[in-house]
Image (spheres, rainbow, N blue to C red):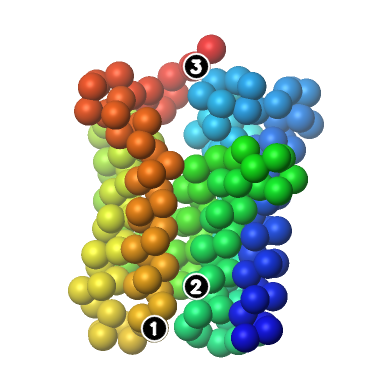
């Protein structure tokens, strides 16, 4: 139990490192949360800083989730520890202690967590999400499709892949959390006013 708790704490602290904030400060000397959509994540970095910084943020944020899960796996093996560590990394990204709990929406970190825990379901769902983004240019829609797809595929094929039940619980929690964090995006998608990728937001 000690290692599980330790993994969760480390996961949260890792998640709390906001690379979009750090890179925006280095590149443009601005607080990313004061520009664009106000979100401290890769999509807003794309809008404010451009493609290169956005890709770097995406990779670094995903890496946070990967490292958190690997720490949980190393310290306590499959099951609760890596799932909880991954969840806390996502929570840390969304509500970072270092930035007064104002962070992003956790999409890239979630990708890192799920790609490490349930690789094949995440891969197949990721392909669907990418196609959706390419066609519609709505990153938020692609993100939600990724969560739904990964969750459904993991549940359906859990016995085949022999995933611990804790991973299913993690997916259900993360999917619910993501939908809640994207509630304003969902509202704009329904009303047809959602921002498309590549569009500058003043």
Q: Which mark is residue 164?
A: 1
**Which class describes the residues within 10 Å of circle 2: few (<14), some (14-19), or many (20+)?**
many
**Vertical order, 69 against 18 (above or below):** below
Which residue is at a point 56% across and 79% down the rendered structure image? 81
| Alpha carbon distance from label 2 to label 1 | 10 Å
Instruction: Check contact, mark 2 vs mark 1: CB within 8 A.
Output: yes
- Residue 169, by quadrant, is bottom left
Graded by Cα atoms within 10 Å as few (under 14), some (14 to 19) or many (20 or more), the crowding at tag 1 reads: some
Which residue sits at x=59%, y=59%?
89
Q: CA distance from mark 1 to mark 3?
A: 42 Å
Going by the picture, which residue comes out furthest to the top? 202
Q: Secondary structure at mark 1?
A: loop
Q: Secondary structure at mark 2?
A: helix
Marks 2 and 1, the one that precedes in the sequence? 2
Residue 158 lies, in percent from the top left, at 28, 80
Q: Which residue is mark 3?
A: 201
Q: How many marks?
A: 3
SS at mark 3 in the image = loop
Q: At 64% from the left edge and 22% from the top edge, which residue is drawn?
A: 34
Single out the mark in the foreground, 2 or 3.
2
Read off the residue under disc 2: 83
């Amino acid at each position: 139990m000690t290692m599980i708790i330790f993994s969760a704490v480390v996961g949260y602290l890792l998640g709390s490192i906001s690379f979009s904030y750090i890179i925006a400060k280095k590149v443009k000397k601005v607080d990313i949360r004061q520009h664009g959509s106000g979100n401290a994540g890769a999509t807003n970095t794309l809008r404010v800083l451009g493609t290169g910084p956005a890709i770097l943020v995406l990779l670094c944020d995903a890496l946070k989730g990967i490292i958190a899960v690997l720490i949980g796996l190393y310290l306590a093996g499959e099951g609760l520890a890596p799932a909880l560590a991954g969840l806390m990394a996502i929570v840390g990204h969304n509500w970072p202690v270092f930035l007064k709990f104002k962070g992003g929406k956790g999409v890239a970190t979630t990708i890192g967590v799920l790609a490490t825990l349930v690789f094949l379901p995440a891969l197949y769902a990721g392909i669907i999400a990418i196609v959706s983004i390419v066609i519609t240019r709505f990153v938020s829609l692609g993100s939600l499709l990724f969560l739904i797809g990964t969750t459904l595929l993991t549940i359906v094929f859990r016995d085949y892949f022999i995933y611990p039940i804790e991973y299913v619980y993690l997916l259900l929690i993360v999917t619910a959390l993501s939908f809640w964090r994207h509630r304003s995006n969902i509202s704009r998608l329904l009303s047809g006013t959602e921002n498309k990728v590549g569009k500058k937001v003043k």
